[in-house]
Amino acid sequence: MVVFSFLDWFWVVAFILLMIVCGALFYRLGKRSMADFFLAGRGLPWWLPATSVYATHSATDTPMWISGVIYKHGLRGIWYTFFSAWCAISAFASTRIFRRSLAYTQAEWQTLRFSGLGAELLRGWIAGWQVFMNMFVLGWVGIAMGKVCNYLFGWPEWLGLILFSSLCATYVLAAGFWGVVMADFQQGVIAFSIIVIVSIFGISMAGGPQQIISKIDSLGQSWRLNPFAFTGLTSGEFPLVWFLTMLVIAVIGGFGMGTSIDWYPEAQRIQSAKTVRDASYSIWAGSALIVVRNSLWAVAILAFFSMFPHIQETAKYEMAWYRLGFEFLPVGLVGFFFAAIVAIHISTISTHLNLGASYATRDLYHHYFKPKASDKELVWVGRISTLILLLGSFIYGLMMQEITQWLIFALWIMAAGIWLPSILQVVWWRFNAWGYLSSWIANLGLSWLIVWILPEFHLIPVLPDYLQFWIMMALGALIYLPITFLTRPEDMDRLVKYYVMSRPLGWWKPVRQEAERRGLLHTGGDREGGK
Amino acid sequence: MGWIKTQWTSEEADQWTKEDYIVFVISPLVYFLLGIGVALSLLLIWYGWVILGASLVLLVLMIKIIDPKLKAISHDYEIKQKKYLEELERIERWEE
């Protein structure tokens, strides 16, 4: 338990008020239209969605996770956090294409890229899945805050979960995405500042960089300072093949849409940017901040390791960064630290409340239930959806202990088998809705088989995750590629319209030629992009 | 940097060109070097500063290469966006 002084409580109350008032101030803008409630009117300069990307992906459980991998693996553990690098290429490829489509959500994009029943099935599936996923993430992140409050004040876990998510919901309900992004900006600044402060404090408390290095050396563990300390090509707990697989997944994934679970919140920020250029820079800069943040955390955790090198329990060393803050910061700053944790927490909560509500409103209610609904009605549906997500997240959060393992598995399978199809849908004109839909279904079956069922019956050994990824990718292709070729290509009218609007990258030659034949594109200029 | 195009017409900017492909290589490299460079620099390891410096040089280069093109794309697209948005709403309301 940590004891707060008056100054500590002052920081906490002041910051919480600032965050909530700052968000709620944009009530009038948020209620103007659905575009305002979910995309801040599509008019934001790049630095606002950029800080929102950064703030959203800094959650209460993120420092626990990073503390865990760095404490266990040393500096090479930084590569576990490198998945955010998908934005490196995405910022200049899929972001540009998606921004030009103007789709509110990834689910809506499916009906712009594909046509007919397959497209509608895809939209309905992705929308429903995103409502569920956002509720789940809210529960997951919410209960992490409950655990932090339990560690700090001895509160029951449900109290931290419900209190801070509810406080956050006030400005999301009032101002929608305007509230989210404006609060994210100051939350991002507060969070980044405290990460720098705690890291520097941690390093100095450990005696400075030289002392950290010499302590780690004296423990005979200098490999911890090497980010490339592989344990072999395929052997050990950090094989080179895992590293290369991770690089391929992260970097090449940037050509697709939905190759990372983080694509969905980013897609909202892409559409909120006022131009294509702003969209590109926001995604790039937001992720660059995440890369820098991870490095700051990594060095702070190395400092912690040099002071406490013999912790065996994962749950204990995962609290390393929090311990640095609460045990070493001076009185007064501890309150600032907790306020920053609240900022880190509610920036993530606000995003997922609004994002889940956008799928429920735009893709389910508006598109399928009431296409003629007015903007005023849709804003209210957005608010009701936000409230339902909030209440659902409490239930998820409280039952999270039991279902975490299953849901981590669900997250993994969502990423593995649809990775390549999520790229193909962007870069290859012939890939159709049935191909993409079948890849989701195939992935679901294959991942159960390969990850759980076959190893359980000793028909195959338990495979390392990088091998699971490649096997699922190959087996999935054996299903969705024949289905793609056995079903008709998408309607050419739809493809031409999509091509002219979005100018996708990759293999689109027949569509481009048709667009030129119809006089929708100029035929001059170079043609490096078309194949 | 004569090999990099800095003046774009909107039609040229809509194509995927060598500038895009160069940025596809540089951009992940910047993240990669930035991640390692910040960590090693904080530990005061000398080559950490070199790596961090290299990442910043590449970042400037990347912006110089892609920014003129992104400006041209954005300018051209903003003109068409209103019409596209109206069309999008018609699709959403099942009018198309």
Image (tube, grey):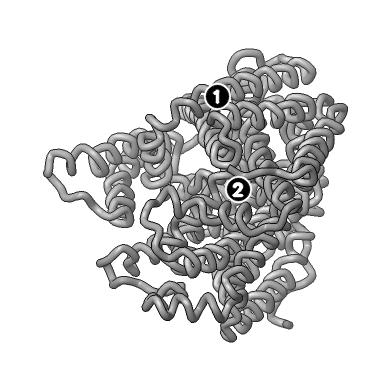
Q: Mark 2 lies on which chain?
A: A
Residue A86 to residue A350: above or below? below
Percent of width and height locating residue A464: 27, 55
> Could you tell me which residue is drawn at 50 percent across and 56 percent down?
A67
Dot 2 or dot 1, earlier in sequence: 2
Q: Where does label 2 land, which residue?
A: A57
> Quadrant of the rendered structure where residue A145 is?
top right
What's the residue type where badge 2 is placed? Answer: His
Report, in whole angstroms, how far the alpha carbon at label 2 lies from the one at label 1. Answer: 20 Å
> Could you tell me which residue is drawn at 66 percent across and 51 percent down?
A54
Residue A127 to residue A271: above or below? above
Residue at the limit of the structure toward the bottom, as seen here = B46
Residue B95 in view of the camera: no
Label 2: few (<14), some (14–19) or many (≥20) C-alpha neighbours in 10 Å: many
Percent of width and height locating residue A274: 79, 46
Q: Where does label 1 land, which residue?
A: A394
Residue A503 to residue A307: above or below? above
